[in-house]
Amino acid sequence: MKKLLLLLILIGIGLFSYRYLKDNEKEVTIPTYNVSGTILSYDDNYVNLTNEDGNFKVKKNNIKENIGTEIMLTCKGIKEEEQKCEVTEYKVLKENEDLFSDYYDEAQEMLKKMTLDEKIGQLLLVRYYDNMNDIIIDYHIGGVIYFEKDFKNKTKEAVIEMIKGNQEASAIPLLTAIDEEGGKVSRLSSNKNIVSTPFLSPQDLYKKNGFTAIEEDVKNKSAVLNELGLNLNLAPVVDVSTNPKDYIYNRTLGLDTNSTMIYAETVIKASKDTNVSYTLKHFPGYGNNLDTHVSSSISNKSLEDIMTYDLPPFKSGIEAGAEAVMVSHNIITSIDKDNPSSLSKNIHDLLKNNLNFTGITITDDLSMGALKNIGNVDVKSLLAGNDILITSDYKTSFNNIKLGVENNIITEDNINDIVMKILAWKYYKKLL
């Protein structure tokens, strides 16, 4: 009898335990959560994304959207680190409207074959030197910028051979750049072998025949640059200045915001299909600031005034299809009181988030006086959001960036994201 009673008790305990475990199994069902992000790039096994909280990566699984697409991920687990997200499904929130999105896959494949040195070189737009071909080969630089002295007294044929020789020395086609604004800043004007009549300033063109003259000038100028082998013009100046006493005044249209908006749109639209890309500058607007070539310049203009008067020409040019924007070295205290615009993440966020700019961001020359007391401007420029650095001291720039990667101040993934966009731009420009 006792044995039977003990057996019944054991069976009861077993049944209770089984039921408890089944109930408990329901209680520990793994939860899910949602997280959104924009695709930055693909690694062998991971997708790299970014959102307002920073960059993160998840396993590829079946994610196959274009780079730049915003997606919502459903993840299994507890939302502590997206890195641990096990994706169960995803949906597209916003298709990529990036200028260069059609070329990211090709750029990604090319990027996989590049060394770190080759990637770093693509970030640099270097002032021309007599031994340029050696520099191109040794440092894998992505582009050359030519100044007035580089054209002086040369025949057109000699200039064509100079630029062609630089291109032939480079494994990856170069950006070949010039500041050909017209008027005060015209690198070709000293050489009548190339242009018999110097290019006019925006103000003189406007006085001649309004925006029609400006449109014709862009097409004529682009034809000259293209014939020489130049594919990037660091113009137009779309800073708003109506005061002749302003440092920047003579390089601007000299008219109000609305007129400058039309100017920006006119130049960018006229430049399309000319094989020469144009660059809006100097973001977020020079205004009445001092010359940053000489020293630092501080603007105390309110954010409201900047948004109302200075940004609209950039927005107009971006909406017209501008591929590049140059960022100034001015300090804008209402946006970032501590850093020049070129080194300010706040400034770049304004450009990319508020103005929806998806193209290439270029620094003004890093050798200018406004940055002379700031250390490691090369890495700081990249971390702020720049894609291409204009530099005269290419050795220092190259070595600083490489050391920054080695010391984990900037990661190679960061470099990859930037270089992929530069390569996509070169595909877009049909250089690749």
Image (tube, rainbow, N blue to C red):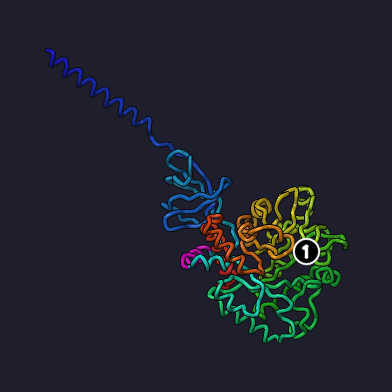
The percent coordinates of residue 413 (x first, y second) are: 51, 57
SS majority, magenta: helix
State the count of labels.
1
Q: Is residue 174 above or below residue 405?
A: below
Camera-side residue of 300 and 237: 300
Residue 400 point in image, percent of width and height? 59, 62
- For this view, does 197 lie left or right of residue 5? right
Q: Amino acid at mark 1?
A: Val
Quadrant for the N terminus in the image: top left
Provide residue 351's location: percent of width, then percent of height: 67, 55
In this image, 144 relative to 311: left or right? Answer: left
Residue at screen point 24% across, 21% down:
13
Query: What are the residue bounds of the magenta stretch?
Result: 104-113
User: Which residue occupies 50% across, 53% down?
Assistant: 48
* Crowding at mark 1 (Cα within 10 Å: few <14, some 14-19, many 20+): few
Q: Can you identify the residue that label 1 sits on?
A: 294
Please, what secondary structure does the residue beneath circle 1 have? Answer: loop
Whether residue 159 is visible, yes or no, is: yes
